[in-house]
Image (spheres, rainbow, N blue to C red):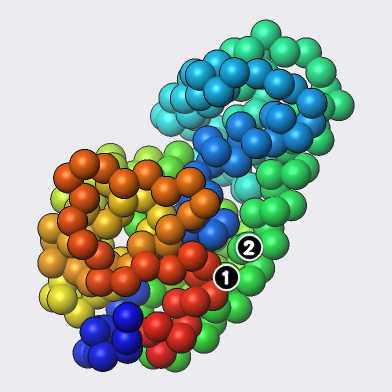
Amino acid sequence: MSFSKFHGCKAVLFDFGGTLDSDGEHWLDRIYQLYTSVGLDLPFPEIKRAFYEADALCHGDPKVVSFGLRPLIKYLVHLQFKALDLEDDAKEQELIEMFCSKSEQFLRRNALLLSRFKRWYRLGLVSNFYGNVATLCEEAGLAEFLDVILDSGQIGISKPDPGIFRTALERLRLDPEKVIFVGDSYERDMIPARGAGMKTIWLKGPNPRIPSNAGPVDAWISSLSELEVLIT
């Protein structure tokens, strides 16, 4: 992995959840670990069911569009508790606080990273989200460094649909080979970004999911802080 592989690139696009708010940890994995941490020893399939039920309810809910990180996680976890028939306000609040405080630490670190990347690259965000990812970016101090923010909840196209990647390239007004995509999901980020002709850097988290049709990436990292050495 060397800078020469990315020589001539003009922009870097990032995923949000699992990429800018952690070092490659999927939200479902984080939530499952936190249920265990607060003493709620539930089977993974049950938590997964509740997680995706809450996720589905947030998509298309107009009030979510205005939510920052803490209101969003509070709403998601409350919906999960309802789906699991859990009534424990103390554990619910503890789980919310643990998730948010960890995310906020990563977002503070990554705002500093983006401020440095901005010296060399145009920057953007392409995320499957609830229509409020721009709100989260403003809140976390990321938005001022981003030339493009694409939220599936706002534009009606979700990764891995190639349309959302083409839209990002059109807004950047750059050819795909001039753009690097950084994300934690092989299926939703790496494969379609590579298919669009972009350079790809996989943020490989502690529980990587590699699909059977996975092809090569241009580089992989285990922390977003490693990206600075790789591309600058």
Indicate whether 162 appears above or below 153: below
Q: Which residue is mark 2?
A: 106
Give the position of the N terminus as an image quadrant: bottom left
Q: Which residue is mark 1?
A: 110
Q: CA distance from mark 1 to mark 2?
A: 6 Å
Q: Is residue 197 left or right of residue 105?
A: left
Give the position of the C terminus as an image quadrant: bottom left
Q: Residues within 10 Å of mark 2 (few under 14, many from 20)?
A: some
Indicate whether 116 appears above or below 129: below
x%, y% of residue 227?
45, 77
Q: At label 2, which amino acid type do we have?
A: Phe
| Identity of the residue drawn at 79% across and 31% down | 38
| Identity of the residue drawn at 31% across and 46% down | 210
x%, y% of residue 172?
25, 73
Q: Which mark is residue 120?
A: none
Q: Do the numbered discs 1 and 2 sit on residues whose CB atoms are within 8 Å?
A: yes
Residue 75 in sight: no
Q: Closer to the camera, 24 or 209?
A: 209
